[in-house]
Image (spheres, rainbow, N blue to C red):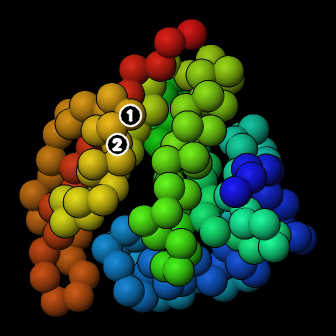
Amino acid sequence: MHIKYCAFDQHAHEMLDIFNDAILNTTALYEYEPRTMEVMALWFEAKSAGDYPVVGAFDEFGRLMGFASFGKFREQPAFQFTVEHSIYVSSEFRGKGVAMELMKTIIVLASRQGYRSLIGAIDLENIASLRLHQKFGFEEVGIIKSAGYKFERWLDLAFYQLALDI
């Protein structure tokens, strides 16, 4: 496995497949409708404009196994040193350490950019993601009960925070 930066023209199609699988089959994203390539273009533009990295984990054949990024936590200027991250792994590569490698990378990149705090918003049923965050020293800082509604049930959203050393 190797980690490298992702680009719209090279990786958006594979990333879109991973996003849409998460939307349609999991509670990792509180969205109902699959994303389109136009949405991906806007997503990449926003990442570029904010100087937010998009990194992917690739197998020995060059297939995208998963990707990660971070972005604004909130719009107000006082939040400028806090970012919210996300990690998505293709269903065929889950449980193989991909998320661990992506998390390591995201933490380093956020620290290098001078951020003080990394936030993860995680569905409370996503035990694998909760454990991943705990392994890296993230602390649970709050739960919003019934924050979302998907798959005919209410979903609780946990916030996890990692204080970054700069």
State whether residue 155 is above or below residue 118.
below
Structural crowding at the residue carrying mark 2, measured as other residues with C-alpha within 10 Å and reported as few (<14), some (14–19) or many (≥20): many
Residue drawn where x is 62% and y is 38% of the image: 105
Q: Which mark is residue 136?
A: 1
Q: Quadrant of residue 36?
A: bottom right
Residue drawn where x is 57% and y is 10% of the image: 166
Q: Which mark is residue 133?
A: 2
Q: Which percent across, then down, holds residue 27?
A: 31, 74
Residue 142 placement, left or right of 121 = left
Q: Which percent across, then down, holds residue 60?
A: 78, 66
Q: Which percent across, then down, holds residue 100?
A: 49, 48
Q: Nearer the viewer, residue 163 or 44?
A: 163
Residue 49: in sight, yes or no? yes
Q: Amino acid at mark 2?
A: His
Give the SS element for disc 1. Answer: loop
Q: Quadrant of residue 30?
A: bottom left
Circle 2/circle 1 CB separation < 8 Å: yes
Give the SS element for disc 2. Answer: helix
Quarter containing the N terminus: bottom right
